[in-house]
Each structure stands twice: as structure tokens, then as C-alpha cells.
Image (cartoon, rainbow, N blue to C red):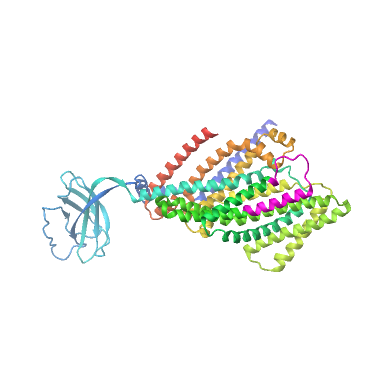
């Protein structure tokens, strides 16, 4: 029995070894592993040339004084004797032995009376005046040199010539043009990564709470509340867009003068503060009357409209201030551009902010009102109402999805993008309502959790380089496209890291805060955030380090930064310039690593 087991184990091991051998052998074939290429003399010469160029980054240069000396030469030898004029031996001159030769012959070149200890290239100049480099020369302390070159295969009846260029350093070292461009691009790379990390944080933090299972697990709702919330979202978004457009027209009439805009903004801010403070009191002894609650709701509505107006005024004021300050700031004009850019960005996103806020408010209000109304109905009446609401909500969702698909694929068939989605959505919604008739609540929190995680996983699966290609098409070649690409990738990566940290916090503080009757927002603020601040800071610093390295890659797709310059020099075979850029990348990445380690040690 033991022998059979040992034999079986040996046989299994042998099969596994054979299978591994087959896999790696096929891998060698697929990847075309060919060691003969390594032994190729041409490959070795090319590798040597590239490595030597990379070892001499184009960073420092000297101003050179060039002296050109030439001598006529014939390829091949003419019929008869070669008559060469006697060189002026009081100056630098060349001699070539033999004085004429056939193509691809080795000849000896000697130089006399050159500047001591100088060097330079040797060129053969055919009638086309194209310089063909044939070697280099270096003079000794007496100004003499002797070297051998091979003539090119350029036979011609006309007299050709050989020239040498002796280069002498003048003055001290100075930065090359490549070094200056590298410095400018590496600074651009650092700030590209900084902005991408900042924008990523702003979106990743709130998203991370929706992607945390321990926070979303207890979020439940009824069928009717969910259906009314779904119906309320598109309605609220449409209302928000309309309101934002109307308020924008009003703000445009109030921003003719910067000082007037500032005064109006201060008045609006004070009004929002007092209205919000009155409508949301900190403590109440007794439940207020219906008229008081209605007045407070109206005050909140006015406060929301004034807030939108204030954002438009602030955006317009920032643009006006930037335009006014730009002439007087001189070299610090980038500060004025910064204010103008912030104003323009705020002006663009106000509509989106208003639409999302209105959608959330209308959805929440519809859900609450629907729940209150349906709780008063009898069980026999509640089921058909739930089925009707769920059918409308399902049809709404499928219609929105069909509209998105039609935008991408341009189907433009009314039956496929309108009738069928509405019918299928209504049937699915009604089926869900029937199946959930015996369930008091639906786990909507887990549904949001899985949807959020799926979107984050999909975004992380797309490389930032691919995102950069898309954004280059949208905003053009440059660092702005790189910022957008890295920001989107940062949102997906940080939201995952943040959410996993939220899932690993201690449950005790959360349970204690919930026991006091705290709302979900209060639970997050007082029970979650204090536990996640240190790791959030650590993850953010690490992500900035990653973005610096990734920003060198997205430049290959036109996303700005030093990568854009690096790929240009590689394509032009300018390896000395590419070496300077790679050296700058290595230095910055190393410094970022030390800086982030130091800050994590001090802060975290």
C-alpha cells in the first residue's frame, strides 16, 4: 500500500515537472527568446553605443571655439598625377597618405600646428556637401595628431575634401539646452502629480464611504421609498439644471462691477448664514408646529437658491479679480491666472453641483413622503401601489440606460430605445415588488456598495496611459490631459484603499455612537473619521509618489510632463538627452520617496 502511494506521488510529481517544462518551453517560443541575437556583432556594437551615450547625459556643456581645416581629396585617383598645392605650414594644415585612393580604403591623416590638447571630428565632404563623419582626432601638447580613417563608398570625378574641426573650450561649464528643458519638464511633472493627487482626494474620500461594506450593510429601505427615490432623481436633476440656469442669468446682471459684486456676495453670504441658522436650530425642547416646519423648509429653499447665487458671484468675482490683477503682478501673474482658472472651474461645475444636490433632495423628499403616505394604507392597498411605483421606477431606470447606450452606439430606433426598455423595466420593477411583498426592507446599501466597487474596479483596470489618450483628444496635448487622466485613476485607486481602511476600523465606537441615536452622518463624522485620518494621510502621500512616477509614462501619450520630452528624444535616437531626462526622473522619484517617508514618520 505504501509502495503504491509512493509510486503515485512520484508519478504525480513527474507529471507536474513535465507539465511545467512544456509550459516554459512554449513560453520561450511565444516570447521568441533568441540568444543568438545577443552574440551578434552588430547588436553588441549598437548596445555599446547606446550604453556609452546613456552614461554621458547631456547636462553640462562648454562654449567651444572651433577651427576648421580642410584638404582636397579624390576618390578614386584621377588619370595622371595628383597635383596638390603646398600647404601653408605657418598655419594648421593636414596631410593625407596616400593623396588619393579607391572607395573604402584606409588612409592616414596627420595634422600639424593645431592648438595643443584639442579634439574634434573628422568629416568627408562629397560634392553634395553632406558631412560624413569618419572618425575623431585629438592633438598632443605640440598640436600634432595622426589617425587612420576609412574612406566612404562615394566615387566621383570631382575633387572632394576632408575636413577636421578642432574644438577648444572657452570659459566655464554651463547648462545645456537639454538640461534647461529637462528642469522645466520635471517641475511640470511634479505639479502635474500634485494636482492629480489633490483632485483625486476630493472625490475619493466621499466615494470611499459608499464602497465600505461595514457602513453600507445596514442601509435599508422599503420598495415604495426606493421606487420614489429613483423617480425623484431624474426629476430633481432636471429641476436643478433649470434653477442653475435661471440663477446664472440673475448673477450675470449683478456682476458688471467687481466692488458691487463683492458687496452683494457679502450680503448673500450673511443671509444664507442667518437663514440656515434659524431653519436648523441646534436644540429643540418640543416638536415645532406644522407652520413652523413649513416656514423652516421655505427658509432652507431660499437659502439654497442664495447659495447657488453666491457661488456664481464668487466665480465671477474670481475671474474679474484675476483679470484686474494680472497687469500689476508682473512675474507673479500666474497668481492672477490661478484665480481666473478657479473662477472658470467653479462656473462650469455649479450646474453639476446644483443638479446633483437637487436630485438628492428631491429623491430623499420623495422617499420620505412616499413612506409616510404608504404607511397609512392598508396591506391590501399597499401591494398594488408598490407594484405601480416599482414599475414606473424600473421603466425610468431602463430608459436612462437605453439613452446612454443610444448615445454611444447611435441606434436611433424608437422601439429599441423607448418602448422595449420601458416595458422590460416596468416588468422587472413589478416583479421585484411582488417578490418583496413579504420583506419589510430591501438592502439598498449593499446594492450601492457592489455598484461602487464594480465601477472602481473597472476604472482601476484601465491604465492611466489609456485614459491620457482619451483626454488628449478632449483637451489637447499637454499636462492638463495628464492631470485629468491621473486624477481619474487616483480616484479609483485611493477610493479602494480608503474604503478598505474604513472596513477595518473598530466597531465599538460606531456602536456606542449609534446607541446615542446619532444619524448616519454623525456616525461617520464622530466614529469613522477619527480612526481613518492617519492611514488616509499615509495612503495619500504614497499615491503622490506613485503619480510622480506615472506622470513620466503618460507623457508618452501626450499627457505632458517629462515623459513627453523623453519619448521625443528616444524616437530621435538622442540617447544623451534621454539619459539626462531619465537621471532627472530617478532623482525626483528618490527624493519623493525620502520626503514621503519623512512626512509619514512625522504626521502618521
Q: Which residue is depicted at the point 47% across and 57% down?
A: 477
Q: Which residue is depicted at the point 70% across and 68% down?
A: 414
Q: Residue 284 colored magenta?
A: yes
Q: Residue 296 colored magenta?
A: yes
**Nearest the camera: 267 or 215?**
267
Residue 521 coordinates in the image, percent (x, y): 68, 42
Horizontal placement of 275 versus 166: left or right?
right
Horizontal placement of 164 versus 328: left or right?
left
Residue 579 coordinates in the image, percent (x, y): 38, 47
**Nearest the camera: 510 or 557?**
510
Overall secondary structure of the magenta section: helix
Please tell me whether residue 17 is drawn above or below residue 126 in the rendered image: above
Give the image quarter of residue 217. Answer: top right
Rendered-image quadrant of the N terminus: top right
Rendered-image quadrant of the C terminus: top right
Horizontal placement of 555 versus 5: left or right?
left
Q: Which residue is depicted at the point 78% across and 43% down?
A: 287
State how many labels appear: 0
Is residue 558 visible in the rendered image? The answer is no
**Magenta-highlighted residues:** 278-307
**Nearest the camera: 291 or 397?**
291
Is residue 366 visible in the rendered image? The answer is yes
Amino acid at each position: 500500500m505504501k509502495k503504491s502511494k509512493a509510486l503515485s506521488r512520484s508519478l504525480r510529481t513527474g507529471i507536474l515537472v513535465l507539465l511545467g517544462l512544456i509550459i516554459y518551453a512554449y513560453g520561450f517560443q511565444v516570447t521568441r527568446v533568441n540568444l543568438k541575437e545577443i552574440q551578434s556583432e552588430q547588436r553588441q556594437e549598437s548596445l555599446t553605443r547606446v550604453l556609452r551615450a546613456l552614461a554621458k547625459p547631456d547636462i553640462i556643456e562648454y562654449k567651444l571655439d572651433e577651427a576648421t581645416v580642410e584638404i582636397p581629396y579624390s576618390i578614386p585617383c584621377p588619370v595622371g598625377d595628383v597635383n596638390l598645392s603646398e600647404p601653408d605650414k605657418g598655419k594648421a594644415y593636414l596631410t593625407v597618405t596616400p593623396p588619393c585612393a579607391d572607395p573604402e580604403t584606409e588612409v592616414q591623416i596627420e595634422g600639424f600646428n593645431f592648438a595643443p590638447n584639442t579634439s574634434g571630428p573628422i568629416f568627408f565632404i562629397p560634392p553634395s556637401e553632406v558631412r560624413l563623419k569618419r572618425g575623431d582626432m585629438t592633438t598632443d601638447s605640440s598640436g600634432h595628431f595622426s589617425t587612420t580613417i576609412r574612406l566612404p563608398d562615394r566615387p566621383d570625378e570631382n575633387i572632394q575634401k576632408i575636413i577636421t574641426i578642432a574644438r577648444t573650450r572657452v570659459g566655464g561649464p554651463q547648462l545645456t539646452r537639454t538640461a534647461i528643458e529637462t528642469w522645466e519638464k520635471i517641475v511640470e511633472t511634479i505639479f502635474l502629480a500634485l494636482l492629480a493627487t489633490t483632485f483625486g482626494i476630493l472625490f475619493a474620500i466621499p466615494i470611499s464611504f459608499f464602497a465600505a461594506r461595514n457602513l453600507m450593510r445596514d442601509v435599508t429601505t422599503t420598495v415604495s421609498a426606493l421606487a420614489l427615490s429613483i423617480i425623484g432623481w431624474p426629476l430633481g436633476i432636471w429641476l436643478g439644471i433649470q434653477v442653475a440656469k435661471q440663477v446664472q442669468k440673475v448673477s450675470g446682471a449683478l456682476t458688471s462691477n467687481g466692488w458691487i459684486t463683492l458687496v452683494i456676495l457679502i450680503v448673500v453670504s450673511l443671509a444664507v448664514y442667518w437663514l440656515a441658522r434659524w431653519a436648523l436650530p441646534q436644540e429643540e425642547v418640543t416638536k415645532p408646529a406644522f407652520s413652523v416646519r413649513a416656514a423652516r423648509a421655505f427658509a432652507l429653499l431660499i437659502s439654497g437658491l442664495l447659495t447657488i447665487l453666491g457661488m456664481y458671484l464668487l466665480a465671477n468675482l474670481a475671474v474679474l479679480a484675476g483679470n484686474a490683477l494680472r497687469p500689476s503682478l508682473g512675474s507673479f501673474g500666474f497668481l492672477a491666472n490661478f484665480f481666473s482658472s478657479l473662477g472658470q472651474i467653479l462656473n462650469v461645475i455649479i450646474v453639476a453641483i446644483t443638479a446633483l444636490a437637487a436630485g438628492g433632495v428631491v429623491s430623499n423628499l420623495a422617499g420620505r413622503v412616499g413612506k409616510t403616505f404608504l404607511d397609512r394604507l392598508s396591506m391590501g392597498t399597499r401591494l398594488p401601489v408598490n407594484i405601480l411605483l416599482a414599475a414606473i421606477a424600473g421603466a425610468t431606470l431602463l430608459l436612462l440606460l437605453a439613452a446612454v447606450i443610444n448615445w454611444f452606439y447611435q441606434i436611433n430606433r424608437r422601439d429599441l430605445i423607448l418602448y422595449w426598455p420601458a416595458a422590460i423595466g416596468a416588468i422587472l420593477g413589478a416583479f421585484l415588488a411582488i417578490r418583496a411583498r413579504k420583506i419589510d426592507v430591501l438592502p439598498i446599501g449593499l446594492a450601492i456598495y457592489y455598484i461602487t466597487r464594480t465601477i472602481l474596479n473597472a476604472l482601476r483596470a484601465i491604465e492611466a496611459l489609456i485614459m491620457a489618450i482619451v483626454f488628449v483628444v478632449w483637451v489637447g496635448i499637454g499636462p492638463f490631459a495628464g492631470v485629468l487622466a491621473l486624477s481619474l485613476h487616483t480616484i479609483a485607486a485611493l477610493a479602494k484603499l480608503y474604503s478598505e481602511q474604513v472596513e477595518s476600523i473598530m466597531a465599538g465606537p460606531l456602536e456606542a455612537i449609534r446607541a446615542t441615536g446619532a444619524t448616519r452622518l454623525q456616525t461617520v463624522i464622530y466614529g469613522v473619521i477619527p480612526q481613518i485620518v492617519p492611514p488616509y494621510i499615509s495612503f495619500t502621500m504614497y499615491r503622490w509618489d506613485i503619480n510622480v512616477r506615472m506622470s513620466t509614462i503618460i507623457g508618452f501619450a501626450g499627457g505632458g510632463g517629462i515623459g513627453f520630452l523623453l519619448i521625443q528624444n528616444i524616437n530621435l535616437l538622442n540617447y544623451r538627452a534621454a539619459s539626462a531626462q531619465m537621471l532627472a526622473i530617478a532623482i525626483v522619484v528618490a527624493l519623493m520617496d525620502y520626503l514621503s517617508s519623512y512626512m509619514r514618520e512625522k504626521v502618521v
